Image: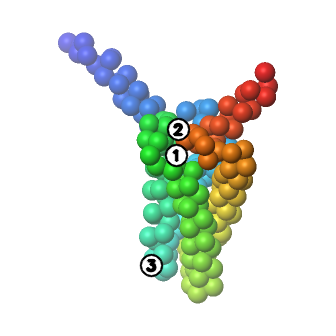
């Protein structure tokens, strides 16, 4: 005999999966694409370092992968808007600055010191990740600078939200 609850059992799984994935709006935004690229490059670099003789460098891509994944989840679900006590743009800026510097250093070391192909691949993906992280911190820095020039110290709103509201009022 058929199970009455079986057809509805697949629907909650799909809802849970869709709630974890970023929305199409966020994934197609500049910040969303940068975070997705950071997550992907950090993961690929992690896998390459884990398979190489330069396995001592595996910690950095893993930590950056987890941090980028957390911020991707936080920004896509608007988790950051619920916790206004944290300075989200500053945390994101510091994460990107440290990631780009450290990825650059370990990439140079893995390409120059180790001879196996996985180390070379990890170094190449690390250099690409360095560029993506550097681009992200450059864009965050410009956003914060614009926010402060507009007198953003008087308000507690995040710069990206204020710029969105500012651009919406310009189009009216």
Q: How crowded is mark 1: few (under 14 residues within 10 Å), some or many (20 or more)?
A: many
Mark 3 element type: helix
- Give the spatial CA distance, label 3 vs label 1: 27 Å
Which mark is in front, 3 or 2?
A: 2
Front-lying residue, 62 or 48: 62
Front-lying residue, 167 or 59: 167
Mark 1 element type: helix
- Give the spatial CA distance, label 2 vs label 1: 6 Å
Residue 168: image quadrant is: top right
Q: Position of residue 104 (x, y in %)?
A: 62, 73
Q: Mark 1 points at which residue?
A: 72
Q: Which residue is drawn at 72% across and 33% down?
A: 166
Residue 9: image quadrant is: top left
Q: Mark 2 points at which residue?
A: 76
Farthest residue, direction right: 171
- Whether pointer 2 and pointer 1 mark residues with C-beta atoms closer than 8 Å, the reply is yes
Q: Residues within 10 Å of mark 3 (few under 14, many from 20)?
A: few
Q: Is residue 134 visible?
A: yes
On residue 56, which mark appears? 3
């Amino acid at each position: 005999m058929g199970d009455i609850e079986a057809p509805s059992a697949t629907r909650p799984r799909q809802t849970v999966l869709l709630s974890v994935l970023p929305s199409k709006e966020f994934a197609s935004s500049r910040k969303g694409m940068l975070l997705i690229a950071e997550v992907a490059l950090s993961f690929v670099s992690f896998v390459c370092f884990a398979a190489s003789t330069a396995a001592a460098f595996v910690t950095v891509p893993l930590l950056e992968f987890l941090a980028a994944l957390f911020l991707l989840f936080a920004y896509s679900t608007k988790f950051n808007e619920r916790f206004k006590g944290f300075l989200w743009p500053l945390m994101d800026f510091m994460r990107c600055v440290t990631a780009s510097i450290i990825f650059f250093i370990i990439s140079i070391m893995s390409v120059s010191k180790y001879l196996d192909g996985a180390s070379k691949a990890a170094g190449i993906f690390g250099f690409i990740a360095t560029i993506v992280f550097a681009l992200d911190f450059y864009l965050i820095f410009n956003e914060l600078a614009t926010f402060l020039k507009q007198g953003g110290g008087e308000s507690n709103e995040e710069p990206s939200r204020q710029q969105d509201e500012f651009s919406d009022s310009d189009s009216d």
